[in-house]
Image (spheres, rainbow, N blue to C red):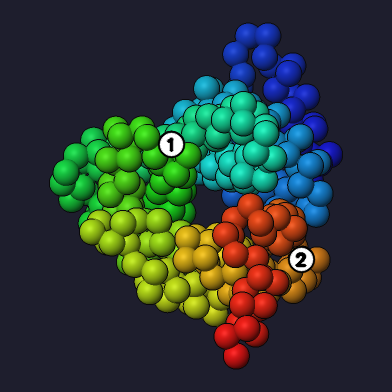
Amino acid sequence: MIRKLLALLALILVLAGCSINQMAVRAVSDALSTGGGEVDAFSSDNDPELVGDALPFVLKLYDTLLAEDPENEELLLSSASAYVSYANGFLQTRATMLDQTEYERREKLISRAKNLYIRGRDRALRALELRYPGFTESVRSDDPAILAETAAEDVPYLYWAAAGWLGAVSTDPFDIGLSMQAARAGALMDRAFELDPAYDEGAIHEFYIAYYAGLPEGLGGSREKARHHFERAVELADGRKASPYVSLATSVAIPQQEIRRFVELMEQALEVDAEAYPQYRLINTIKQEEARFYLDNLDRFFVVGLDELENAEEEDE
């Protein structure tokens, strides 16, 4: 695959003096797009730093190819998922793990994450617009009736559009204009869920963990719903993913100050065999790094430490 990709890139460079030949663009697009094999080369890697260093080149390659072939739906999907995944795994997650003294660096990472989340969202929306003219305008309005026209094959596009949109919201709660769009993004994910609730071994259920935990009750938030979707995500993943445990721990256990449950969930995340499931090796490695960070820094997230809690319980007895 790598040799094939290099040959195709060489062909593009030869043709770049005038205009890039669309057949060559499509050939590279097929190699990079979902199912083409190159995505697996990233998702199955166990070295997040290596992937993090390589992904910016891939993202800009997507941009170059899309400039020549803007109606390539599969490439738009791959670009959307790559931008959203990079924003989440290599920018926003890294920002949360920085020391509190690194405020400026943290804010810069969060700002970049917001920008790339939106870029990913827009790629997925563009693909849906090609399939359903007027889609974006309809979804941005208060009457997204066009969602009813979408079918099962649109689920990946709906998922990544919603994930990018709400990812951007999560980075900047003080952006009122963006925050007011959260319900529209939620409608996209709800439609994806209607069409395929088991998508990607529980990915939508996993999304709903943080979604319902983060919403105020008056706007539909519910910790019970978050826990329900956690259980379904774990069931569908069947031990292959560490991420549901980290998501419930950070979105429910921290706000509730349930330190014992938090530690239990993070330890369960660490019990997942990251090497056993190649398709999730990268994300499992990232999430397990995150779990170790939280376990090593409990005092930053909990008012009462585990030892203090146990001592207090012993005194009560």
- Whether residue 269 is visible here, answered yes or no, is yes
At mark 1, the secondary structure is loop
> Residue 145's x, y, as percent?
18, 50
Kindly identify the amino acid type of the residue bearing the numbered disc 1. Answer: Asp
The residue pinned by badge 2 equals 274
Which residue is nearer to you in this view: 208 or 97? 97
The residue pinned by badge 1 equals 172
On-image quarter of the N terminus = top right
Residue 3 lies left or right of residue 230; in this view the side is right
Which residue is nearer to you in this view: 18 or 97? 97
- Whether residue 237 is visible here, answered yes or no, is no
Instruction: Give the residue furthest to the front.
Output: 315
Instruction: Give the residue furthest to the bottom.
Output: 317
Residue 12 lies left or right of residue 149; in this view the side is right
Residue 54 lies left or right of residue 170; in this view the side is right
> Residue 224's x, y, as percent?
38, 74
Q: Earlier in the sequence, mark 2 or mark 1?
A: 1
Residue drawn at point x = 38 percent, y = 62 percent: 212
